[in-house]
Image (cartoon, rainbow, N blue to C red):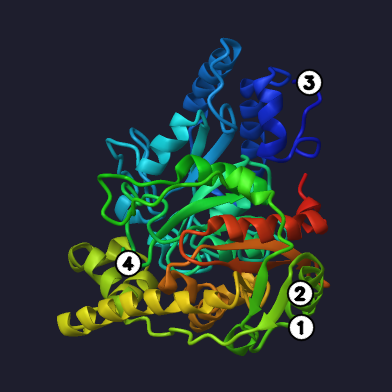
Amino acid sequence: MSGVGMTAISTIAELAPRLRSREISPVELTRECLERIEKLNPVLNAFITVTAESALAESRVAETEIARGEWRAPLHGIPVSVQDLIHTAGVRTTSASKLHENRVPGDDAEVVRRLRRAGAVILGKNNLHEFAYGGSSLISHFGEVRNPWHRGRITGGSSGGSAAAVVAGMGYASIGTDTAGSIREPAALCGCVGLKATYGRVPSRGVIPLSPSLDHVGPLARSVADVSIVLQAIAGFDTADLTTAEVPVVDYVAGMKESAARLRVGVPREYFFDDLDPGVASAMNHALDGIRTIAAEVKEVRLDVPTDRTLQKAESYATHAKSVAQNPELYDPETVRRIRSGEEVSAAEYIEQRRELDATRWSIRSIFADVDVLVTPTTPMPAPSITELKASPEALRPAELKLLRNTRPFNVWGLPAISVPCGFTQSGLPIGLQIAGPPWREDLVLQLAFAYEQATAWHKRNCPLP
């Protein structure tokens, strides 16, 4: 594989046929990623645990299988990582918390099993916001994650390490989690693609929960084609997971390439476009101009946006109540405060909110009688400064709430949503475009995302790393 580098081959879609034809080697590809991790992780802190030895062993197995003509799928021999909230058998899963510092699961999470079944090589476990309860990845027992585009900026969270690893070339994809935007927000702030499928499309069994009614698991990668490939491997019903649904999985990779010319695009300006950073506003206007040349129709729509967080607070407290009561010192104080904010939610309030969630998820379907997909900014502003947020802890929570403002409603609605790069600020910080669709129609979301990506070059820009 001499001469193959991150700048020459940067996507799974480009690598897969070359791996299958044995033009390049999974072993050398894995070694290259491990070398970048060794070089860049001390700067970015994107990994908590690197499984170099087992990754090389897995890459050798992949190489042997491919040589025997037993190629499995486009992920076969591709080095990837997973958020350190996701169980990996025999490898510690810390949740970025002192509480789980030495916790070693006996089994893989279902998504990890599916990655392995597709032949992916697991490089290690990505850093995150402690227990996924935040949107900055500043709160971690293992230190904050830093943005590859500007090391003085946050990555977003909770899947900050996953986004940083993908953008810096420390692997070709990662699996993250998303309860209020924790895949899409870091994808936007770091300049990669992040997808949250329909609630129930991807199993969460073996993933440490935050709010089970809102938790999603999904891929981050460098292109729309790459997240489609990963989604194809991890999507589908799990008989042992009550949160999944037995809905057929289509061919996302083929469907993504279908024409977006017939799509009707809804733009909910009220709420989602309020108080935008000037750079984000300019990028969104430019993006919408481009989408008008791609889609059949672009029109404004109005959405009744859910903003109550009682359900998430109650479920997060229920998940952590016992351990917070017994060992509060093993959590970051801010995480404890957030968890305890749900302590006073009564059973009656919770039941009412759960009913409201079901009603909201049913009623949102009506908007898709008039449009096929929705488009918004992923975040209202680019990545804030680490120094400023750490110097003023009281500013952290408002900043996170604002960053997650546009993504959170789609967790409540349970709709598929993706963030794709759509520009940069004058200071060089990435900006994300969010596309959402009807339940179980990830194919429509991917169609517009792919068409937009093909019409632009934002995803091709490499960040200034050595």
Is 277 left, or right, of 114 in this rendering?
Answer: right
Say what amino acid the circle numbered 2 marks: Leu
Mark before the other along the chain sequence, 2 or 1: 1
Check disc 4 and report the residue beneath it.
213
Asked if the residue under mark 2 is in contact with the one under mark 3, i.e. CB atoms within 8 Å, the reply is no
User: 15 and 25: which one is in front?
Assistant: 15
Mark before the other along the chain sequence, 4 or 3: 3
Please give the name of the residue rendered at 34% of the width and 34% of the height, measured from the top-left corner.
89
Check disc 1 and report the residue beneath it.
278
Check disc 2 and report the residue beneath it.
288
Asked if the residue under mark 4 is in contact with the one under mark 1, i.e. CB atoms within 8 Å, the reply is no
User: 182 and 203: which one is in front?
Assistant: 203
Q: Which one is closest to the eye, mark 2 or mark 4?
A: 2
Mark before the other along the chain sequence, 1 or 4: 4
Please give the name of the residue rendered at 49% of the width and 58% of the height, measured from the top-left corner.
197
Mark before the other along the chain sequence, 3 or 1: 3
Residues at marks 3 and 1, CA–CA distance in whole angstroms:
44 Å
Label 2 element class: helix
Residues at marks 1 and 4, CA–CA distance in whole angstroms:
34 Å
